[in-house]
Image (cartoon, helix red, strand yellow):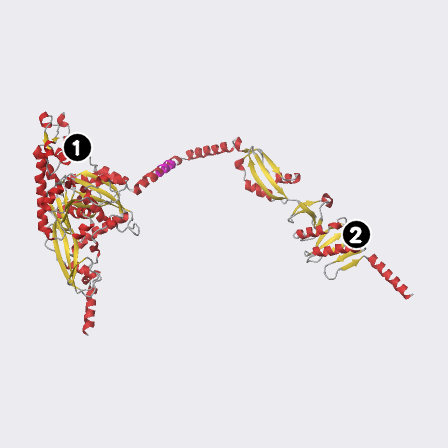
Amino acid sequence: MSEMRPPRFLSKQDPAPSRWSYRYQRLMLTPMFRLALRFGVPFAISLSVGLVYFADQGRRDSFNLAFADLRAEIKNRPEFMVKLMAIDGATAALGEDIRAVVPLDFPLSSFEFDLEEIRQNVAALPAVKSARIKIKSGGILQIDIDERQPVAIWRRLEGLSLLDREGVAFRRLQSRHERSDLPLIAGDGAAEELAEAMQILAVAAPLQERLRGVARIGERRWDVVLDRDQRIMLPEERPVQALQRVLALDTARDLLGRDVTVVDMRVAHRPTLRMSDAATRERWTARATEVKVEDQ
Amino acid sequence: MIELYETQRAMRNMRRAAMQRGVIAILDVGSSKIACLVLRFDGSEVLGDTVVSMAGQAGFRVIGAATTRSRGVRFGEIDTMAETERAIRTAVQAAQKMANIRVDHVIACFSGGDPRSYGLVGDVDLDGQVVSDEDVSRVLSACDVPDIGAAREVLHAQPVNFALDHRSGLSDPRGQMGARLATDMHLLSVDGSVIQNLAHCVRRCDLELAGIYSSSYAAGYAALVEDEQELGAACIDMGGGTTGVSIFMKKHMIYADAVRLGGDHVTGDISMGLQVPMSTAERIKTFYGGVVATGMDDREMIDMGGDTGDWEHDRRSVSRTELIGIMRPRVEEILEEVRAKLDAAGFDHLPSQQIVLTGGASQIPGLDGLASRILGQQVRLGRPVRVQGLPQAATGPGFASAVGLSLFAAHPQDEWWDFELPVDRYPARSLKRVMRWFRDNW
């Protein structure tokens, strides 16, 4: 058997690679080929496997079903369920309104909410200044409301409504007496100039007992309306100062206590008074008397 | 002379393509080993303001190196194609594996093929007063090619000297004034079939040949320091099958030759003299070899070993003196042959007589002493210059030609091929002449 062994000098030869192994190694050292092998082949295999598997309609349906089941199962886990809605910072009436615009049947999965849409719905309510919505732990849909605070009542042809600081009419009122603590503002365009009206009202505080409200006339100037149909007509420019002048006159001469129907301050250098008919007649009588006395 | 430019041009283009790819392989096909280096050109040419050019060692990095025992190569020529092809495959594959990149272009060198040097002379009258690129290409093509023999091919042809009128020794005459331009050219021819065989082997390995060099040229370029190349020196590249001789001057090779004797013959002598197989003889030579015997060597006994089964035969030993006695005559013979080649080249007329021994066989202890006795006083042992990334195992003198090839790959000395074809071959030129003649005479 020993002659079958290859001669010793052959076994000592260093092993040269065969032509094909040499070529194979060169191929494997080609950068593009390596890249293709590393990414292209796995991609192609997984793609073809996927295509072959999903070529069958039944498999596709069962996969979709299983996927939908899995989705529903995760969605309906108790950790994700929202059980109630909490509203903070709103009055009871507003709370009712909010529950009306957010018609949700609790419990619901938190995946089914579109919080932004709910927030916009809530914020679209006129009485809501801004709203923040979040889902708190424990399955609570928390709605934090910044409600509009009424500062005045606005009387228009359509009826009474509440105004907030920004001049937004946000709620109808049936009667003035519902909120008799708030000042009354009338006239078209009054809401836009609410800040000025509030200044005038603040200055008119000494007349609080007699003040009926302020009225916007012709959407350009203000009237202060007192009881006994008295009216102080203020100019377009610097109405507050004009009112202060009237108040000074009132303090000095008790102007408003007299039988005057209109104090017209519209022309600053010529304040004008309009007296009532009775007072005018009285004055005429008095003047006639004076004339007689002089004649005598 | 023009046809010769064409093949060189083709190889230059191939080399340029490889440079653009950034990777090129160096293949030193020797009789005893085949070395393959993989170079990466990283464009680190500019190192800073203070460091310039680094003697051509910058700009590339060796990223793979492999050697394998050569098979099928004798006297630096391919003897058995299939064996050589397998050896080249082994070396290239190992180097590629180390570099972890595929190489497609290879620059090869070989030492065989009976290289012969010719000195060419050409001269032209200058048209204008100033030497232009065109004039240089004209004078290069004016050199008359000697009869190099049938089936021989030109391996290198470079202008080594330019003379302008009476001034000689110009390295670059362009821009200078003169009336007559002459050039001296060195042409190295080798056996065409050797180049064909090597090209075929390389092609069989799916590689493309981007250049062929004579290994004595490459070894001289790597082993001679810059001063020696400038002032004149001879490099003796003592390989396994052949011993190459190259003479450099003014940074150009001016003569190359090869002696068909080398380290393998020393090994063969030992094998025959001591009756041991070649591999054992090679081991004994590399471990215990020498050329100068001392009294100590009489007492140093070398076990020759062997596993023939014959106890007496396997337990033989030989004294180192005997070994030296076998090696020295052969080494002397090689050096005598080299001496004859140098004398034939007229080396003793050169201003500098420096001789540098390199190559694997120059590692025999005491060789420099023996060589200085035969070749002349100024003998030193040379190692190749250091290049970036070369493994320690490949920095020995046996890798001189491989390192020289890497230097050539980065900075080839063939810039003269860049000149365009002489323009006087085009008709436009003659029209211009006619025009000038008219203007001068009417």
To which quarter of the image does residue B172 belong?
bottom left
Q: Nearer the viewer, mark 1 or mark 2?
A: 1
- Which region shows up in magenta? A43-51
Residue drawn 20% across the image and 36% down it: A16
Position of A237 relative to B70 (above/below) = below
Q: Is residue A46 magenta?
A: yes
From the image, tell me which residue sits under label 1.
A12
Position of B371 relative to B428 (above/below) = above
Amino acid carrying mark 2 in the image: Arg
Judge by depth and name the residue closer to the eye, B368 or B346. B368
- Label of residue B129 in the image: none
Q: Is residue A108 magenta?
A: no
To which quarter of the image does residue B425 belong?
bottom left
From the image, tell me which residue sits under label 2.
A228
- Residue B346 image point, x, y percent: 10, 52
Instruction: Tell which subunit mark 2 falls on.
Output: A
Q: Main secondary structure of the magenta part?
A: helix
Element on which disc 2 rests? loop
Residue drawn 83% across the image and 57% down it: A279
